[in-house]
Image (tube, helix red, strand yellow):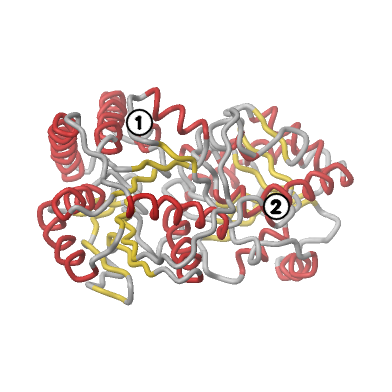
Amino acid sequence: MVRENEKWDPTTILEGMFFHIGLFSDSNIRSTDGVSIWIKSTMSALASEGHTTFVVCPASTESFREEEGNAYTIGPARPLTSYPSYGVVGRPVSAIGKVGRILMKEKPDVIHSNTPLIIGFAALWASKTLGIPLVGTLHTLLPEMVKHYPPLKLKTVAEILGWQIYNHYYNLCDVVTCPTPIVKRMLLERGIRRKIILVPNGVDVDRFQPSDNVGKDFRATHCIPNDNTVILFTGRLSFEKRVDLLIMAFKRLLKDTEAFLLILGDGPLKYALIELVKKLKLGKRVIFLGGIEHDDDLIPVIYNAADIFVLPSMFETQGLSVLEAMACGKTVVATSVGGNVSLIEDKHNGVLVRPNDSDELANALKTLATDDQTRRQMGKAARKTAEAYSIKSTTRRLTHIYRSLTVETPHRTFSDIPHTFLYSFTFFSTYTLFCFLLKLKMI
């Protein structure tokens, strides 16, 4: 649901015009986070409409390949001590050189950057020097995320530097896209003056759809009775997701009904959450499914095995897992933050609760777990909402943007000069500090 009187047109039709798009990301294409999932889904949707794509992304040390099909990797990346699933690609100047060679070979019509960090820096440099239009998309609010992880005295510094990088980077793009009106408003408040276009993240509604049969088979495999309520969380097991609150709310739910909690994902807090489950004596009722590749056919099956999907995050730009659950006809309980309020209409297609409030979360779970009719009605409404966000519709919106950039003169102003200087200065200062802290194993 798009709010604040802002609309996006998912029906733009392009005829006789095909593009070659370079997608740049600081998420490894093999990972299961939201950005890499979005990129893979978008590449598939673009290919189905006749466009060609390639992706430039970091490589993990385990999966380092110089080139694999239409994926080019830069790296390998060094994992963070406090967040092993994230890492930093070393030597930005070397990355710029490699990106230049890739672009000279591929000759794309448009560069689409999904990061303002190292690979995004290379994309920006290539765009300015080679005269290729640049689309910048904001998927993740890193300034909000990083302040929970650096050493205590650096939290404020990290947040300030993060927003400075965002401000100057996106002011150097030709077009900026973001998934929800709330994120757009935040960008405007932070001083981003380039044209900002709303392009929601899309979901494959053909792959993610309601199916009671596959859900029952999964329950049987894990010895879950059909008359028990199943709660599901999918995503990173990290501080900002507040899975600990969900576990505590689930403990309260068990006083009123028989239920199971499925936790799908991996992250730095995995073992701490396992210990919390043991401490609360929930071992037989909480099942950690681990990390599963998003391409795995089991993912839609797990959604369909659940009755209620929960996302208790402290912030979200637009939760892709929420859309996937809604596409499977599941009622979603989510915190009333960020992009969640653009997708969920409270008490209609889901339930919104205050962030960091385990009591309110527990009460919402109890209401839905004990009222099958209301839960099913919300699930049907959720499916209709998800259908409006099909990956084909949102990708068609992107191709409209690509078309406008290829027929218009790139946007250049005198303000590019200070933004270029300030972005470069802030970027390299932050990168130097980051590497220093990484060497000391402080992050």
Q: How many numbered marks are there?
A: 2
The vertical placement of 411 against 86, above or below, is above
What residue is rendered at 68% in x and 32% in y?
Answer: 352
Left-right relation of 393 to 418: right
The vertical placement of 86 against 209, above or below, is above
The vertical placement of 348 against 135, above or below, is above
The residue labelled by disc 2 is: 285
C-alpha span from label 2 to label 1? 33 Å
Question: Which amino acid, by three-letter code, is at mark 1?
Answer: Lys
Label 1 near label 2: C-beta < 8 Å? no
Left-right relation of 221 to 239: right
| Foreground disc of the pair 2, 1 | 1
x%, y% of residue 310? 65, 44
What residue is rendered at 52% in x and 49% in y?
Answer: 201
x%, y% of residue 203? 58, 56
What residue is rendered at 61% in x and 69% in y?
Answer: 298
The vertical placement of 355 against 7, above or below, is above
The quadrant in which the C terminus is found is top left
Q: Could you tell me which secondary element the residue under label 1 belongs to?
A: loop
The residue labelled by disc 1 is: 147
Q: Could you tell me which secondary element the residue under label 2 belongs to?
A: loop
Q: Quadrant of residue 247?
A: top right
x%, y% of residue 275? 53, 46
Estimate how packed mark 1 is, as few (under 14), some (14 to 19) or many (20 or more) residues with alpha carbons within 10 Å: some
Question: Which amino acid, by three-letter code, is at mark 2?
Answer: Arg
Quick one: 193 or 55, which is closer to the camera? 193
What residue is rendered at 75% in x and 34% in y?
Answer: 364
